[in-house]
Image (cartoon, helix red, strand yellow):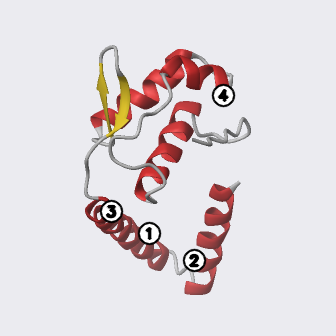
Amino acid sequence: MNILLSRTTNKPIYEQIKIQIKQSILRGEMVEGESLPSMRELAKNLEVSVITTKRAYVDLEAEGYVTSFVGKGTFVAKQNVALLKESKVIQIEEKLSIIVRDSKMIDLSLDDLQLLVEKKYKEELE
């Protein structure tokens, strides 16, 4: 598992870890039953606190992406990746509806909105 952290973003480290693990699962790079590194091992590899990795793992478990077993470790949970993706697309559409409504309210052109979206999209890749 390859996790890249940015120290220059406003996004908390645990959130960056969580997002990248979710992406790996949704892309099929990590499959059901595959083990994740221990919290200590991941913390050591990323040079962060164990508390940080624990927060990411606890959140991932609460959201149903992973399952933890005392003494055994943390594993990718059984899930329907297509259903998870569809759910995310629905959430994105709902948020976009709000953004489009707000953009129209201030007479922001479609071209300007697209530029903003492209800028944010590229920022997230960094």
3D distance between C-alphas at marks 4 and 3:
30 Å
**Above or below 52: residue 119:** below
Q: Of residues 88 and 10, which is closer to you in this image?
A: 88
- Disc 1 or disc 3, which is closer to the eye? 3
Task: Please give the label number shown on residue 113.
Answer: 2
- Side of 89 relative to 21 (left or right): left
What x and y, as percent, mark residue 46?
66, 28
Disc 1: which residue = 99
What's under tag 2, amino acid-wise?
Leu
- Quarter of the rendering containing residue 122: bottom right
In the depicted structure, whether residue 17 falls above or below residue 44: below
- Depth-wise, is mark 3 or mark 2 nearer the camera? 3
Q: Which residue is mark 3?
A: 91
Amino acid bearing label 1 = Ile
Mark 4 neighbour density, 10 Å: few (under 14) some (14–19) many (20 or more)? some
SS at mark 1 in the image: helix
Residue 48 image offset from top left, x and y in percent: 63, 21
CA distance separating discs 4 and 1: 35 Å
Q: Which residue type carries mark 4? A: Leu
| Residue located beneath label 4 in the image | 46
* C-alpha gap between disc 3 and disc 2: 19 Å
In the displayed structure, would residue 81 be above or below residue 90? above
- Residue 87: mark in rendering: none
Task: Indicate which label's residue lies in the foreground, 4 or 3.
Answer: 4
If the image is split into quadrants, where does the N terminus sit? top right
Q: Earlier in the sequence, mark 4 or mark 3?
A: 4
Going from N to C along the chain, the mark reached first, 4 or 1, is 4
Left or right: 15 with respect to 75?
Answer: right
Q: Is residue 96 left or right of residue 116?
A: left
Question: Mark 1 or 3 closer to N-term?
Answer: 3
